[in-house]
Image (cartoon, rainbow, N blue to C red):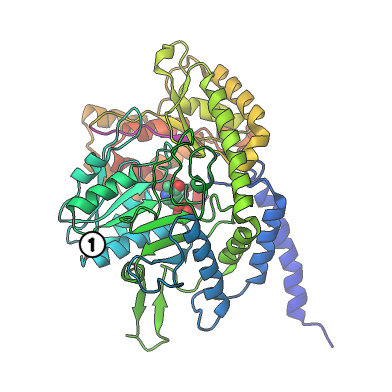
């Protein structure tokens, strides 16, 4: 048999492409090993990553669009939903209780943003609202940006309820005060991404139950916490099968999951503390109506009957198969052990960072997130700006995430730096703390970061009133591109030196902090587009 000449050709070119891929990937910061303290969730077990890769390979080629053609899609999605529902207090559908309105149904999605978006879509549909007719999503301002995005895409209005500027906390009363006849969904986080705060879910539920239309949804965004809080040691959240928190534990977490009867939906990401590769999250909804309200179906075209439970049409089974295999392999005991490692690392980091002169760890709830701000009591000469500190950490190979100050009428939430702790962090705690101290020593007493020179003219013109925010929003995209291009050209000093891959972010964040939010959004969009255009 003569070999297929095309096969020979593509093998050759393919090898070349793979070699280039290796070279490109070598420019990225490491996704495992614990030196990147956001975006990646590393169990620290190479066996688990290997398992996920093998499971994904076995699912290769399947189109997750159609479980009537590929039955494994329904089995795998069903397995994931059953497991996450049990972890989040949703009980088991079927067995005896089939069809009760309290039953919990689930959808596997591509990620947290999609889960949150579908929860908002379902809420809009259950409320019988048309896009643009004034329906609102009510949430603390600290809720994930995915809900602002959902409002934008779904023709809803986002109503952000201000939080205590010192603690990042909202009260149930404040949140409920924003609920009115236009509200289709109220959202709480468990926990919030920026500061790791768990919103008062049970109290909000009680208020909704007592005073409001039962069709208003209550969504708990547990994208981050859903697979970690139920296993957190010492918090009373003893995990699956439990009836509720144990108040004798040192730091009990008030109930926040499906055990709170008024909660109508909840999202949890497998690609975070499920330790699965990127591309899998779950949305659980109470009752068939809300569950199916997010689905799109049509027979009104000449092609195949379309039913899409999620936003995509054709979709890979690989991420779900990988997540399913990881869940099966870990089980409750594996998950509990990985979370215990995470919790030990978190405690030691909180203790160590609290001792760094000039920094302060924000008050937080049990969980794997922490945020550090400048210690206001340190005085100008001894203060450490968290963004300068983040850049100094990056130069030493540890990437933490800078978060801009957030202006609200009740007072500004300070500039901060965010750390996401994972099981692998435990091995690196001493190194991270050493870097944290050295970085603080380097930048202590420095003046606050200033915006990039390329933005100076614009910011001056805004400050003097020569330009209004509306003028800036009216600028043609090519002019905004030119403005941002100057920043990109000047702002890559950190890339060559540091292992953590990020350039100096403090000046860009300083610009964001000084600009109106809509102008800032336009600038960061242009910035990322310029990065993508290369
Ligand atoms: C990560 C996250 C999201 C969004 O999830 P993606 O998977 O990044 O789309 C939503 N809410 C919270 C609290 C998160 O941490």
Q: Nearer the viewer, residue 498 or 127?
A: 127
Q: Is residue 529 visible?
A: no
Residue that badge 1 annotates: 215
Determine the residue positioned at 60% across, 30% down.
Answer: 395
Residue 94 position (above or below residue 241): below
Q: In which quarter of the image is residue 483?
A: top left
Q: What quarter of the picture does the N terminus occupy?
A: bottom right
Q: Quadrant of residue 170?
A: top left
Determine the residue positioned at 42% across, 38% down.
Answer: 194
Q: Which stretch appears magenta?
A: 402-409
Residue 363 position (above or below residue 127): above
**Outermost left residue:** 181
Query: Dot 1, how many residues are within 10 Å of its Cα: few (below 14), some (14-19), or many (20+)?
Result: some
Residue 329 screen position, x and y as percent: 65, 59
Numbered disc 1: secondary structure = loop
Q: Is the magenta stretch mostly helix, strand or loop?
A: loop
**Outermost right residue:** 1
- Number of dots carrying numbers: 1
Q: Is residue 79 visible?
A: yes
Residue 285 position (above or below residue 88): below
Residue 394 screen position, x and y as percent: 58, 32
């Amino acid at each position: 048999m003569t070999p297929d000449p095309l096969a020979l050709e593509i093998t050759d070119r393919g090898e070349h492409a793979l070699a280039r891929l290796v070279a490109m990937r070598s420019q990225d910061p490491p996704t495992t090993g614990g030196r990147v303290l956001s975006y990646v969730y590393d169990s620290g077990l190479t066996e688990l990553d290997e398992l996920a890769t093998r499971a994904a390979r076995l699912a290769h080629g399947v189109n997750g669009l159609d479980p009537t053609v590929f039955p494994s899609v329904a089995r795998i999605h069903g397995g994931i939903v059953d497991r996450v529902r049990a972890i989040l207090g949703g009980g088991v559908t079927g067995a005896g209780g089939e069809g009760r309105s309290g039953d919990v149904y689930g959808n596997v999605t591509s990620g947290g943003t999609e889960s949150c978006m579908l929860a908002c879509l379902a809420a809009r549909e259950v409320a019988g609202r048309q896009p643009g007719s004034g329906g609102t999503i009510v949430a603390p301002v600290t809720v994930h940006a995915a809900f602002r995005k959902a409002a934008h895409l779904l023709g809803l209005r986002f109503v952000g309820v201000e939080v205590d500027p010192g603690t990042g906390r909202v009260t149930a009363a404040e949140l409920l005060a924003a609920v009115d006849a236009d509200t289709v969904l109220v959202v709480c986080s468990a926990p919030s991404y920026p500061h790791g705060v768990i919103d008062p879910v049970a109290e909000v539920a009680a208020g909704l139950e007592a005073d409001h239309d039962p069709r208003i949804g209550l969504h708990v965004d547990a994208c981050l916490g859903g697979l970690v809080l139920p296993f957190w040691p010492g918090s009373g959240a003893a995990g699956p099968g439990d009836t509720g928190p144990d108040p004798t534990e040192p730091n009990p977490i008030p109930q926040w999951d499906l055990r709170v009867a008024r909660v109508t939906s909840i999202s949890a990401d497998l690609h975070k503390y499920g330790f699965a590769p990127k591309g899998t999250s779950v949305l659980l909804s109470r009752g068939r109506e809300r569950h199916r309200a997010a689905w799109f179906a049509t027979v009104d075209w000449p092609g195949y009957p379309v039913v899409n439970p999620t936003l995509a049409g054709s979709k890979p089974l690989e991420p779900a198969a990988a997540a399913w295999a990881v869940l099966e392999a870990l089980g409750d005991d594996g998950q509990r052990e990985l979370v215990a490692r995470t919790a030990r690392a978190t405690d030691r980091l909180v203790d160590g960072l609290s001792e760094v002169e000039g920094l302060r760890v924000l008050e937080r709830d049990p969980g794997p997130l922490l945020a550090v701000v400048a210690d206001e009591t340190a005085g100008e000469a001894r203060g450490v700006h968290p963004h300068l500190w983040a850049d100094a950490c990056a130069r030493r190979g540890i990437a933490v995430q800078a978060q801009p100050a957030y202006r609200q009428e009740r007072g500004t939430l300070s500039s901060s730096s965010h750390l996401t702790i994972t099981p692998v962090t435990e091995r690196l705690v001493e190194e991270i703390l050493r870097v944290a101290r050295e970085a603080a020593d380097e930048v202590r007493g420095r003046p606050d970061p200033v915006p990039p020179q390329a933005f100076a003219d614009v910011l001056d013109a805004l400050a003097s009133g020569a330009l209004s925010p509306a003028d800036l929003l009216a600028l043609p995209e090519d002019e905004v591109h030119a403005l941002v291009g100057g920043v990109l050209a000047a702002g890559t000093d950190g890339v060559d030196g540091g292992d953590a891959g990020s350039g100096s972010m403090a000046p860009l964040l300083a610009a964001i902090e000084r600009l109106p939010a809509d102008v800032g959004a336009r600038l960061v969009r242009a910035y990322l587009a310029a990065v993508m255009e290369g």
